[in-house]
Image (cartoon, rainbow, N blue to C red):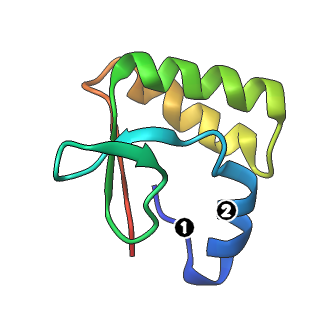
Amino acid sequence: MYVYLDDLDIFFVEYNGIFNDGTYNNLKSGPLDLWGINYYSPSQVVAIMQKIETCKPKDDDILLKWLQRADKANGIYVLGI
């Protein structure tokens, strides 16, 4: 997943509450780290999809299509800038 720098603030406002409790590279977890690595397990991906379907943030359809393929893999990474 790529988020353009110009869209970073919008992404953070729309998705910060959805992408929470990711695991960082130091194996601690917390809110979305825009500057680091965030890993989400397959079960977290399912929960993220449910939150997106409920909240309907901007461009949710694009993200849901990607996540529907990712939930069959070993989770996802959201990489910071």
Which residue is drawn at the image coordinates 67% and 62% (left, top)? 11
Judge the density around disc 1: few (<14), some (14-19), many (≥20) Cα neighbours within 10 Å: some
Left or right of 25? Residue 73 is right
In the image, 23 versus 28, the foreground residue is: 28
Disc 1 target residue: 3
Q: Quadrant of residue 52?
A: top right
Locate residue 43: give its quadrant: top left
Q: Horizontally, is 35 left or right of 15 in the view? A: left
From the viewer's perspective, tell me whether residue 38 is left or right of residue 60.
left
Camera-side residue of 74 and 47: 47
Query: Split into 4 quadrants, where in the image is the C terminus?
Result: bottom left
For the residue pair 68 and 53, the one nearer the viewer reads as 53
- At label 1, the amino acid type is Val
Which label sits on residue 23? none
When the figure is inspected, residue 11 is found, relative to residue 43, above or below; the finding is below
Residue 23 x, y percent position in the rendering: 30, 41
Q: Give SS at disc 1.
A: loop
User: Pointer 2 and pointer 1: residues touching (CB < 8 Å)?
Assistant: yes
The image shows residue 4 at horizontal and vertical percentages of 56, 76
Q: Earlier in the sequence, mark 2 or mark 1?
A: 1
Amino acid type of the residue tagged 2 in the rendering: Phe
Is the residue marked by circle 2 packed among few (<14), some (14-19), or many (20+) residues within 10 Å? some
Instruction: State the residue lying farthest toward the bottom.
Output: 6
Separation (CA) of disc 2 from disc 1: 8 Å
Residue that extends furthest to the left in the rendered view of this protein: 26
Q: Residue at x 16, y 51 (%)?
A: 26
Quadrant where the N terminus sits is bottom left
- On the image, numbered disc 2 is attached to which residue? 11
Q: How many numbered dots are placed on residues in this image?
A: 2
Position of residue 1 relative to residue 35, above or below, is: above
